Image (cartoon, rainbow, N blue to C red):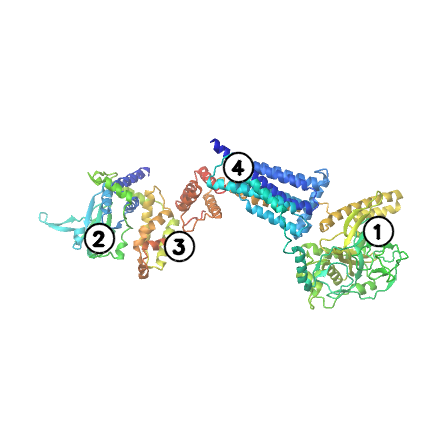
Amino acid sequence: MIETQRSIHEVLTNIEKVIIGKHEVTTLSLAALLAKGHVLLEDVPGVGKTMLVRALAKSLDCSFNRIQFTPDLLPSDVTGVSIYHPHTQQFEYRKGPIVGDIVLADEINRTSPKTQSALLEAMEESSVTVDGETVMINQPFFVMATQNPIEYEGTYPLPEAQLDRFLIKLEMGYPTEDEELKMLSLTGGLHPIEALTAVIDKRNVVAMQEDVNRVYIDPLVQQYIIKLVRQTRQHDAVQLGVSPRGAIGLMRVAKAYAYIQNRDYVIPDDVVYLAPYVLAHRLILTHEAKYAKMTGAQVIQTVLNQIDVPARKDFN
Amino acid sequence: MEGNRRMQQGEAFLSFLLYVGGLLLALEWLSPLHDLTDSEPFSLFVIYAILCFGLTYLQLSSLLSFFIKMMGLLFIIDRAFLPRPAFGSEWFQQIQWEGRVNINALFNQNWHQLTDLFQTFLLLILIALMSYLLYFWLITMKRVFVYIVLTIVFITVMDTFTTFQADLAIIRLLMVSLFMLVIGNYLKRVKQQGLTFEVGLWFEKVVVPLFVIVAIAVFVGYYAPKSEPVWPDPVPFLTTTAERLTTNDQNRQVGYSEDDAQLGGSFEQDDTPVFRANTPVEHYWRIESLDTYTGHSWERSTELSYQSFQDDALDLIYNQQDQMLQNATIDYLDGANFDRLVYPQGLSQVNQTEALSLQFDHETGIIEPTNANDSLHSEPIELSFRDPDLTVDQLRRANGPTPADITSLYLQLPDDLPDRVRELAEEIVSEESTRYDQAVAIEQYFNQGDFTYQTQNIPVPEDDQDYVDQFLFETQAGYCDNFSTSMVVMLRSVGIPARWVKGFTSGEQIEDLSTADQEMYQYEVTNGNAHSWVEVYFLEIGWVPFEPTIGFSGNEVVYEDSEEEGDQSDSSLDEEEIEQEDQEEEESLAEEQEQEQQEEQEETAAETEQATSQFNIWPWFIGLVGLSLIIAAIRWKWLLKKAILWRWSHFKEPKDLQKAYHQLLKLLALFRVKRAANQTLHDFAQDVDQLFGITSMSKLTNSYARLLYRDDHSLDDDQALVQYYQNVVETILS
């Protein structure tokens, strides 16, 4: 545990050499990775989304693929194609960019729903099926999809049902003035990402994922999660609340987050902290709420305020 | 550095002066006491106040200071009130008696019954508390003004409403107040603005002008012409207004009147002296009895049939001839607006002169001058009486058929008397078999705490209401008429002949005229001493007085230690005369003691209790509880801390930790640091730590969270946990 703790710390510092001042986003991304989930990153271009993923891949000694989504991208451009091989006289599967360890799916809302669903299916199943042949994608498998919030022109917004496939949704946000200044001073010469070296190897990442699975979560905290999730379904501003998949997701990230915090059990604080990231994008708000400029995160916050944190239990 | 030190010294000196000013004002608070009461230990109060203020100023350890103050307090109480030698048996008896009387008074809310000792005790505690309060007010907070205003208000109120003259006090007050205000204001500014001062400069700029201003203010204030008050003296003004307002309220003047056509209503106190009496024994003064109760008044059913008064003609209590004759003198004063003789229960002879012959009515006991032209007022009247001596045994044995002439008159009740009066009376006497015990049971019924003695706001019964019924079941508050009438009615309703007696209580002893071989005391009886009580008929004994009114005593004709006396008197018949004399001496000694006790009790108007030799633990218990409450009020934080720390000296089981943790949350809530139900424990713990500048709460919470959310029941680092816990508790309660 102490060993892995040091590794995690090193990974985070390593990434922060490249991404200045985004500790929270870095940690949450790592948590999603360790929870075998995927991240949707919504932000303006140029805030370092790509750098984050590349740094993560490099630090973890993982392969890095990037898919730039465009309107004319085909599903097979994502999943790969079977090509007839004249020598063997057989169809041979050529891996698509999705088959990799860490994949950056850039601007996924620019591509057609068909291609989107190919990506999302691969994410959910950890496998791709081409011409009836299923190819498993090994762990670690981590997709970080980004979408651009501004340029809605010519985009295909992700349907809510698809959004549910992302374990967490993050926003990078602009760096602070100091951070930006520091960024400038670091620029010039070799890009820091080139100097980055792996901190742990891939096998360790898989082992860590297994460890995360074993993190203890008490029925008390589980009940707390369920209460939160169910409460979202009662909320006035919500048309469709969080699905059971959301509850499972919240539990998994909470475990991973606890693991990163060097704790072998989940506490309500983890849940409270993670709930907006895990649950907000899974809500479908009513039209009234949307007109009132209410956001999913606000709804989750009110739900958190409504539910009592478990603070005692029966000992027998 | 040097300047800083000097400044601190200067500040300390000024604070000291301020506190001395506070002491002087505190003494002004005490000064009306000197004028208004005859409390002898006034100088002791002053010394005690100085002691308390001095101790508080020295800021000794609170325990030591408390101890010294308590010792001083006890010393004063002992010197002023308790018999010598200290810690002797009498001393303890006195303390026990004081405790009993005061606790009774406290519980019955009869504040006027509190004894001097207890009042002094409270006053001294107040002085001690005041020294604390003023230290905080003046030295810590540097707030002077409110205290000065309060003092001025107090002094002026005392001046206006009491006989206390505050002329000089106001001048002293003005001087001290001005000094204090200047010093207080200066110190506050030093504190707020960080002023520095040079000693020399300060002298020029502050001290000299201060003295000049104070001197001018006093001079001008004292010598400047003052106009007459614009408003009338509020006291007479208020009383007359009050009178005007209440005249419709059927207020009556207290005092003896021949008319009892209406019972009920409030009455006003009136201290006009009626007569002076010299008598060796304290007793009530009887005037007449009445036999018929109408539901609203007492009336006489028989015509007065006068006969001339002979020695022993009025035998209220029979067969007392072997009792010693005692002499008394009555001197009627101008305040007496009636011409009837007041006499002791055992009246034997009246010295009738040529100028005065007397006639009397046997049924009522009214004794009047035979000639309408004669007056009892013209010269002092000498009479002799036998102090009745009845034993309980005698009275208990007196259970025979009552003669018809008694029953025909003294069992009368109005037809419309509500049944519940009779039912109550029957219930009260149901346990008792003899007439005497039944009468005592009814007499004691009023002492059980439901009834209060008061003279104001007593309603007059409506036409369809019965006076006794109203008192027993509705108001339960009243004065002697209520109590005595109710007792008579209840006695009659259970078949015991009784009558209603009017007269005066023994009054106030104003002089001790005792000589070596004869006891004699002079009493002054005022209208305020007018009283009514009860006489119960006992076969072959006669009319025995009872006193149902709570808070009154002093008319005993029955003595509890009956067996001893009975035995003695039996044997003494056969023994030689010397022994008889011995016995008489003994009896008079016993009487003397009884008298002394009665005097004390009369002073405090406390109810007489059956003298029990048993050590009564209740007063002590209640005192102890009271004391603990006081301590708890002062040191509750400390006590709470000790209690919590004692309770959680270790955590044996997970349950313990949970309980302790939630107690801590409650404790924090008490200090308005409350965890919202939706706040996580760690989050809250961080708030707490930040608030108090500690880290223990988070550490403790980590352990509890491990137990709660990890289900980890091992409390292996118990000691560290306890340490964190204690740390938090101590921080909160420090």
Residue labelled with disc 2: A108
Q: Label 4, label 2: how many angstroms apart (C-alpha)? A: 86 Å
Q: Number of labelled discs?
A: 4
Instruction: Determine whether label 1 and label 3 are within 8 Å by CB.
Output: no
Picture coordinates of residue B223, whole percent (x, y) = 63, 46
Q: Earlier in the sequence, mark 3 or mark 2?
A: 2
Q: Answer yes or no: are tags 4 and 1 on the same subunit.
A: yes
Q: Is residue B220 left or right of residue B669?
A: right
Camera sees residue B205: yes
Q: Which residue is label 1 attached to?
A: B328
Mark 3–mark 2 Cα distance, whole angstroms, equals 35 Å
Which marked residue is nearer to the observer: mark 1 or mark 2? 1
Is residue A137 visible in the rendered structure shown here?
no
Disc 1 marks a residue whose amino acid type is Ala
Labels 4 & 1 near each other (Cβ < 8 A)? no
Inter-mark Cα distance, 4 to 1: 76 Å
Between A166 and B101, the one lying in front of the other is B101
In the displayed structure, B9 sits above or below B677; it is above
- Against B688, residue A243 (above or below) is below
